[in-house]
Image (cartoon, rainbow, N blue to C red):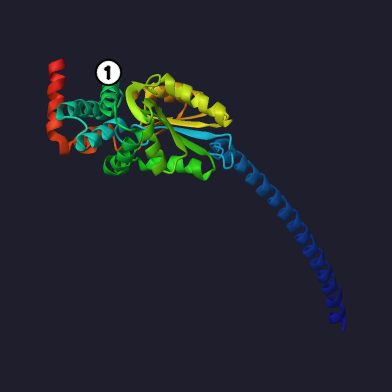
Amino acid sequence: MAALGWLTPRRRSATARSVLAGEAAAEAARKTSLQLEREREEEAAALEAARAAEAVPEEPEFPVVGDVRAAAFFDLDNTVMQGAAIFHFGRGLYKRKFFQRSELARFAWAQVWFRLAGVEDPAHMQEARDSALSIVKGHRVSELMSIGEEIYDEYMADRIWPGTRALAQAHLDAGQKVWLVTAAPVETATIIARRLGLTGALGTVAESVDGVYTGRLVGELLHGPAKAEAVRALAAAEGLDLGRCAAYSDSHNDIPMLSLVGHPYAINPDTKLRRHARDREWRLRDYRTGRKAAKIGIPAAAGLGAVAGGTAAAVALHRRRR
């Protein structure tokens, strides 16, 4: 019994100490858990701050859905369509015997130059204008519009840049109006705009009396500064805020138009426009496979295979001028 009496106090003492140890461990665990939780929160906050500092700010949504005071203006030649509309139109008129092979040579050479150089040559533009006016003189506007529909299907439909077409559609989907702005005849531009589902077109206006072309222009070609004036006038009439509008072009000749809007884009840009756009941090898009590839593919892209005689005459004409 004495032995049992000796053991009982020790057991009780051990039990009390065990309870104390357990409570102390639990309290330490709780404090440690809280400390670890604070440390994890601090680490997460520091990591989030680091990510925020390194992250590139996201651009605001554009085009802005429902912004009816915004619109988009697209150059046509080499921006929306490969090549120049006036030369495709000329080929279609030649096919319909509106003029002779010698005149086709001028259209063909100007188109070859446009595809090789990737820029508009003022002399070629003037020559194309004079040729087109002399060709359509005396014809009814309705006749040329009907023929233009056919020419679009024959020579233009397959030359629309899908990337640029998608940009235009994005503006349409946002509820905005989209206009072509081109030196091409307004009738041709209107046909293209309608076929692409766009709002309309600003183009060069040829004078007509009683529905018949006179062979003269109203003003001048819609080119360079004239495009900017047309956009400014349309924006005023439509109640647009140019600072919220976008414009797209491939040519440095359209810098006046691009500079008017708050969202200028250089599309398939020529060298001068590319440099200008980079200096001003304008957005750039290039849907060509590369300048070298474009040059290699000139004859097919220009559609001159079917008029090889016209191309040869154009080259000969250029040599004589040199």
Q: What residue is rendered at 40% in x and 36% in y? A: 190
Left or right? Give the position of 289 relative to 205: left
Q: Is residue 76 left or right of residue 124?
A: right
Using a 10 Å C-alpha cutoff, classify the residue at mark 1 as few (fewer than 14 neighbours), some (14 to 19) or many (20 or more): few
Outermost residue toward the top? 322
Q: Position of residue 64 (x, y in %)?
A: 56, 39
Say which of 138 and 171 sits in front. 138
Q: Which of these two is toward me, 186 or 276?
A: 186
Q: Label 1, on which residue?
A: 123
In terms of depth relative to the viewer, which is nearer, 312 or 16?
A: 312
Vertical comparison of 141 with 6: above or below: above
Q: From the image, which quarter does the C terminus lie in?
A: top left
Quadrant of the image occupied by residue 96: top left
- Residue, far front: 210
Quadrant location of the N terminus in the rendered image: bottom right
Answer yes or no: is residue 322 visible: no
Quarter occupied by residue 120: top left
Q: Residue, x 60% and y 43% (percent of image)?
A: 47
- Percent across and percent down for residue 68 are 58, 38
Left-right relation of 30 to 226: right
